[in-house]
Amino acid sequence: MVTPRTAWLFLAPALLVLALVAGWPLGRTIFFSLTDARLDALEEWRFLGLSNYAFLLTDPDWWGAVWVTLIFAVVSVSIETMLGLVIALTLNARMQGRGLVRAAMLVPWAIPTVVSAQMWAWMLHDQHGVVNAALLGMGVIAQPLAWTAEPGLALAAVIAVDVWKSTPFMALLTLAALQLVPNELYEAAKVDGLGPVGTFFRITLPLIWPALLVAILFRTMDALRVFDLMYVLTGNSRATASMSVHARQLLVDFQDVGYGSAAATMVALVVALVAVALVTLGRLRLSPAGRA
């Protein structure tokens, strides 16, 4: 039997590595967020306390980035969850070529985000992009659209690209959970006269909910800290600037390490709070007391 002391000894190397690769950068970022450090003179700083955070909470650009990130996260994760569930239910059925479809489905997820973002930037180009050419050819639009430059279209374009790339992840995790549901339950549901809709909501969804919640949690955390997709597609555009893009702009473009570190720390705090909220809500819904 493994004692708690032995368990901590086994965990010690991993905890040490985690402290070095994650704890030290995070601690250094929090420290700089309390100063007025500049990128071109990191050794010359003054302690400001929480002044950077107080200013950040009144900064309209920061709140704009927060709203863009929240809209992006809610819309993209919701669409990916619904599409992933539909695709997983389809692939879970007996059909010819199911293995080939599963392999093809993973291609968008396997492509690095920067590569897929640049690929879509070319496809969505207003003058030479294949998307405008196809829509013009079908008569859907009368003139080329600047998908990534027009503020009213840019965020929708970014969400569409993220859905294309991340839906396979949701489908794969959901499919793995579906394959663990015993067939005996479905047979018993047929005997009891439960229809497809009732079977889904009373058997399938409750049993795959823990795996689905994990997938939603991972995707939400990824969406809240999104950077590369927006930066490659739209640069520093305010219409699509996420919290991470805004923090990078403060740190690198404006070389304001103190203020930028405060923004980066707030990104980590927001992601942590949302993760805790999702886990708490998921447990409440799954707990026996929470069931009807």
Image: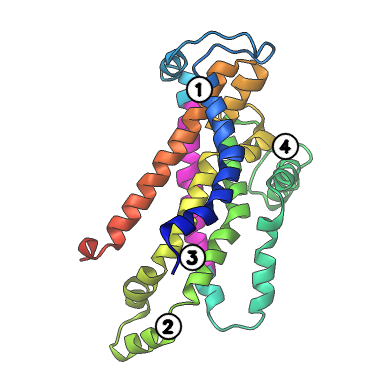
Farthest residue toward the right?
128
What residue sits right under mark 4 in the picture?
A: 126
Q: CA distance from mark 3 to mark 1?
A: 38 Å
What residue sits right under mark 1 in the picture?
A: 262
Report the residue at 48% width, 71% height from top: 177
Q: CA distance from mark 2 to mark 4?
A: 50 Å
Q: Secondary structure at mark 3?
A: helix
Residue type beneath disc 1: Ala
Report the residue at 49% width, 23% height from top: 62
Q: Foreground mark, 3 or 2?
A: 2
Q: Is residue 72 above or below residue 236?
A: below
Nearer to us in this view, 162 or 255: 255
Q: CA distance from mark 1 to mark 2?
A: 49 Å
Q: CA distance from mark 4 to mark 1?
A: 37 Å
Nearer to us in this view, 14 or 253: 14
What residue sits right under mark 3 in the picture?
A: 85
What x and y, as percent, mark residue 291? Answer: 23, 65
Q: CA distance from mark 3 to mark 2?
A: 18 Å
Whether tag 3 and tag 1 are in contact, CB under 8 A, the answer is no
Look at the image and say whether residue 260 sits in the magenta stretch. no
Q: Residues within 10 Å of mark 1 (few under 14, many from 20)?
A: many
Residue type beneath disc 2: Pro
Q: Secondary structure at mark 4?
A: loop
